[in-house]
């Protein structure tokens, strides 16, 4: 299964209360099914390219995660001590959420009902809540800076844009007008509202060690949103923001993200979750090199307790194919697997944490890597 369907299964097994929630009156006829759409013609040019080398996915701005992201949660994501010195870790942090924990989905298939403006507003509030999420990351960066010393470029933040699902026919008001997401122009307007609010909130927060790099399209396929992507990409280009997409394995459009306005595409190999042969990773490296896209490292909590062989497969094959020297990387780690590896007393977990951290911290020190040349 790809990562999207793995997340759906986890959500179902958690027994979240939203399974029994009635649908809001705003979309009584919504069935959870979306309509496949035709591909939008290519945009004339893409926008700002990202300078992020290592982008880690941070889930948890909704209510489905028990542990809040505090400054201590970010310790192993910000820096790594190799026994001799403290080293910088990830330079990019992608904040995203799939549902609000109360029956509203931020992307197709992750809860019974589409998220409305109220849930989109709550998502933004949670991202910028004092003492957690982005603010907590900034706090930990301050502590690490004092410890490591010297000057370091600001870390980059990318924010996931909720998918404007067609079932939300009375999504909420923007400039006195109720948006109906069965209409493409209204879906675009909703996304523009979200982008503007995040940009403004980020500016108001005055983070010391962070800057807003861009936005991420949460939907991992184009089945439901192809017709609105180009206008959103153009809007972000005008805002001088990057536009990131991480499609599942060979999701239609993965090899030509420019047609949707994406500036960064990271391909999911989906080897970790699916019963695929080891050759899938080699194929992923070939696809990335052939189409000029980047790659994602994938793992979750199942690596704990000495079960890290599949993650080691990623690290081995990527090394053999010089991916570390030639490609940007994203890191899917479920909710907080890196934190769990860091805190584990199991020698195998510590060895896996050390190997991954050595790779990331080394990439952070590389001078003028080719993948940053736009």
Image (cartoon, grey):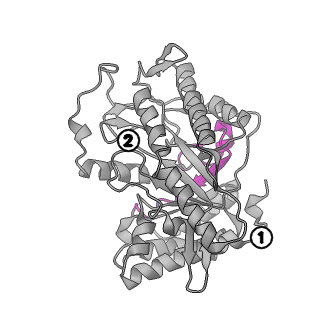
Q: Vertically, is 14 above or below 40?
A: below
- Dot 2 falls on a residue whose secondary structure is loop
- Dot 1 falls on a residue whose secondary structure is loop
Q: Is residue 259 magenta?
A: yes
Question: Residue 121 appears in which quarter of the rendering?
Answer: top left
Mark earlier in primary sequence (1, 2): 2
Q: Quadrant of the N terminus?
A: bottom left
Q: Vertically, is 256 above or below 154?
A: above
- Residues 205 and 157: in front is 205
Q: Residue at x 47, y 59 (%)?
A: 270
Q: Residue at x 53, y 26 (%)?
A: 190
Where is residue 67? Give x, y as percent.
Answer: 35, 56
Q: Main secondary structure of the magenta part?
A: loop
- Residues 24 and 167: in front is 24
Q: Is residue 139 magenta?
A: no
Q: Vertically, is 62 above or below 83?
A: above
Q: Residue at x 75, y 66 (%)?
A: 369
Where is residue 108? Give x, y as percent.
Answer: 41, 37
Is residue 316 in view? no
Q: Which mark is residue 367?
A: 1
Where is residue 221? Give x, y as percent.
Answer: 50, 42
Where is residue 269? Give x, y as percent.
Answer: 52, 60
Question: Residue 258 appears in which quarter of the rendering?
Answer: top right
Question: Residue 104 appears in which quarter of the rendering?
Answer: top left
Magenta stretch in the rendered image: 248-274
Q: Which mark is residue 99?
A: 2
How many other residues sit within 10 Å of disc 1, few (<14), some (14-19) or many (≥20)?
Answer: few
Q: Vertically, is 116 above or below 216?
A: above
- Residues 357 and 61: in front is 61
Separation (CA) of disc 1 from disc 2: 39 Å
How many other residues sit within 10 Å of disc 2, few (<14), some (14-19) or many (≥20)?
Answer: many
């Amino acid at each position: 299964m790809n990562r999207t369907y793995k997340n759906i299964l986890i959500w179902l097994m958690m027994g979240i209360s939203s399974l029994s929630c009635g649908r809001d009156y705003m979309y009584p006829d919504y069935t959870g099914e979306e309509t496949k759409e035709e591909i939008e013609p290519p945009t004339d040019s893409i926008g700002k390219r990202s300078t992020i080398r290592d982008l880690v996915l941070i889930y948890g701005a909704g209510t489905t995660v028990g542990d809040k992201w505090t400054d201590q949660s970010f310790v192993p994501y910000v820096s790594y001590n190799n026994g001799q010195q403290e080293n910088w870790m990830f330079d990019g942090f992608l904040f995203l959420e799939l549902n609000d924990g109360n029956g509203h989905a931020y992307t197709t298939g992750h809860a019974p009902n589409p998220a409305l403006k109220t849930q989109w507003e709550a998502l933004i509030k949670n991202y910028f809540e004092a003492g957690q999420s982005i603010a907590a990351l900034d706090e930990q960066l301050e502590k690490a800076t004092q410890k490591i010393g010297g000057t370091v470029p600001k870390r980059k933040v990318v924010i996931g844009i909720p998918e404007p699902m067609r079932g939300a026919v009375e999504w909420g008001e923007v400039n006195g007008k109720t948006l109906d997401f069965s209409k493409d122009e209204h879906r675009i307007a909703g996304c523009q509202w979200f982008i503007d609010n995040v940009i403004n909130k980020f500016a108001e927060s005055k983070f010391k060690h962070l800057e807003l790099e861009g936005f991420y399209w949460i939907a991992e396929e184009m089945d439901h949103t192809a017709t609105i992507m180009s206008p959103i990409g153009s809007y972000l280009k005008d805002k001088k923001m990057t536009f990131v997409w991480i499609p599942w394995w060979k999701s239609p459009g993965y090899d030509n993200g420019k047609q949707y306005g994406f500036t960064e595409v990271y391909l999911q190999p989906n080897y970790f979750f699916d019963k695929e042969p080891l050759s899938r990773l080699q194929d992923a490296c070939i696809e990335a090199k052939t189409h000029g896209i980047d790659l994602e490292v994938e793992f979750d909590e199942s690596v704990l307790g000495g079960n890290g062989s599949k993650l080691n497969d990623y690290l081995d094959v990527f090394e053999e194919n010089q991916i570390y020297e030639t490609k940007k990387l994203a890191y899917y780690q479920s909710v907080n697997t890196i934190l769990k590896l860091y805190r584990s007393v199991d020698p195998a977990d510590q060895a896996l944490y050390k190997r991954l951290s050595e790779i990331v911290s080394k990439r952070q020190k590389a001078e003028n890597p080719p993948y940053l040349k736009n």
